Amino acid sequence: MARVRAATRGLVLVEGRLLVTMLHGRTGEFWLTPGGGQHFGETKEENVAREVLEETGYRVRVGDLACGRDYLGARHFPDWDTGFQQTELFFWCHLLDPDPDPAAVEHDTHQTGVQWVPVPELIGSPLYPRRLATWLQEDPETRPTWLGDVN
């Protein structure tokens, strides 16, 4: 059954390092920024804060919209993801506490861990969407807000 989902993701940067979740799936290891599907009745900001907490244990204050993208599975993984598409909005997030709360963590099904990655090391990494790795290193004054259908 085909479905379209609204999702949000948190961009948590501390001292030049990005917080990512590590997962293992059909393509091997891959990384995502913490986030996921928006629940009915939940604002985008509430969605980001909940997802970051559940996936990493970190409590955050959600800031401004950073960028957005579409993911159309049929264009990126036509052999197995043709029935799924998602619009994701990425928000800047600020840590409220430098220590994660392990009791708050509810890892996603394929999640294997969490790590802080120096931004320069994101290029060539298994981060998705791959465009995010270069976007983070572009001039904030000229980088686009809408990334389009990228993976």
Image (tube, grey):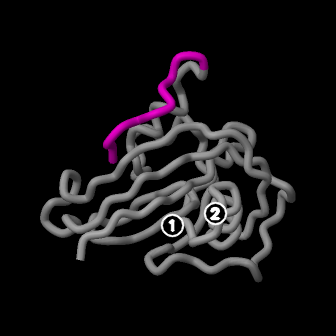
Q: Which mark is residue 47?
A: 2
Residue 149 within the segment the image draws in magenta:
yes
Q: Position of residue 150 (x, y in %)?
A: 33, 43
Extreme residue in the left direction: 79
Residue 45 belongs to the span the image colors magenta: no
Q: Secondary structure at mark 2?
A: helix
Left or right of 97? Residue 129 is left
Q: Position of residue 126 (x, y in %)?
A: 39, 52
Give the residue drawn at x 59%, y 48%.
117
Badge 2 crowding class, 10 Å Cα cut-off, few under 14, some 14 to 19, many 20 or more, is many
Please report the residue visible at 52 percent of the width from the left and 64 percent of the height from the top. 36
Q: Quadrant of the N terminus?
A: bottom left
Q: Is residue 18 above or below residue 43?
A: above
Position of 98 compared to 27: left or right? Answer: right
Q: Earlier in the sequence, mark 1 or mark 2?
A: 1
The answer to which of 73 and 130 lies nearer the viewer is: 73
Q: Which residues are magenta?
A: 141-151
Q: Nearer the viewer, residue 45 or 54?
A: 45
Q: Which residue is mark 1?
A: 37
Checking the image for residue 115, the label placed there is none
At 63% from the left and 46% from the top, the residue drawn is 91
From the viewer's perspective, tell me whether residue 52 is left or right of residue 67: right
Instruction: Tell me where residue 145 appears, x and y as whole percent.
Output: 51, 31
Looking at numbered disc 1 in the image, what kind of residue is underneath it? Gly
Cβ–Cβ under 8 Å for marks 1 and 2? yes
What residue type is disc 2 on? Asn
Percent coordinates x, y for residue 17 in the rendering? 65, 43
Predominant secondary structure in magenta?
loop
Q: Is residue 114 above or below residue 145?
A: below
Gap in angstroms between the C-alphas marked 1 and 2: 8 Å
